[in-house]
Image (spheres, rainbow, N blue to C red):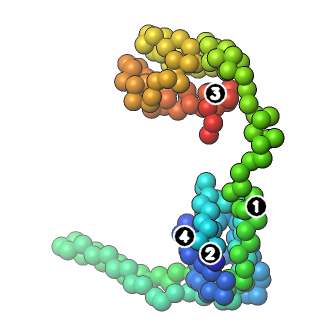
Amino acid sequence: MYAIIETGGKQYRVSPGQSIEVENLSAEIGQTLEIGSVLLLANDGDVVVGTPTVEGAAVRATVVDQGRGRKVTVFKFRSGNRYQRKLGHRQAYTRLLIQDILTGRAEEERREPSPAVAEEKAVPVEEVAAALEVSIEELDLASRVMSALKGAGLGSVQDLLQADDEELLAIRGFGPKALEQLHAALKEKGFIQK
């Protein structure tokens, strides 16, 4: 079993019993930490990839050491200008001993939904079609974006959902920021998922 975690802006592949050096953490030696940003879990061929993290999963680790890495010399020099600077730097680190990988709800997410739950979410086709015929004015878009969409002949939500991003960006006066605003409005009203 192993996991890929993120801490200090870097990603590490860890398994129980392993010792790793990470960017300096404010923790005392002997303290137990739970790292919640688990990007991937793998257990006997079953792989769960997070979006961006795996919900409920965590890695429990114990702080073994707080230290500093070897010295790195930083030398700046400009020829002909009598300019030279010499600095040293030692990067602080924390050594962790991985105790355990907690899977949390990773197994539940992989299971298929029960048929009863799937039936509850079914919506009649007539309701969906009526919802898509909503005018774009109800999306509360900026007036400039609205006029650009209407100028291109896109007057309803159904027209917007049928057009892909390249077609929308080809509209004069409709740029990437307008596309972001449109996607946010459609998500807010529940026309598109994530």
Residue picked out by circle 1: 105
Q: Residue 44's mark?
A: 2
Residue 25 makes an appearance in the image: yes
Q: Count the marks: how many?
A: 4
Residue picked out by circle 3: 191
Give the alpha-carbon distance from disc 3 to disc 2, as whole Å.
39 Å
Determine which quarter of the picture holds residue 125: top right
Residue type indicated by callout 1: Arg
Of the numbered discs 1 and 3, the one sitting upstream in the chain is 1
Residue type indicated by callout 4: Gln
- Disc 4 crowd rating (10 Å Cα; few below 14, some 14-19, many 20+) is some
Quarter of the figure that contains the N terminus: bottom right
Q: Secondary structure at mark 4?
A: strand
Of the numbered discs 1 and 2, the one sitting upstream in the chain is 2
- Residue in the image at 55% along x and 27% along y: 182
Give the alpha-carbon distance from disc 3 to disc 4, as whole Å.
35 Å
Of the numbered discs 3 and 4, the one sitting upstream in the chain is 4
> Is 91 situated above or below 42?
below
Q: Please name which of the two marks, 3 or 2, marks the residue nearer to the observer.
A: 2
Give the alpha-carbon distance from disc 1 to disc 2, as whole Å.
17 Å
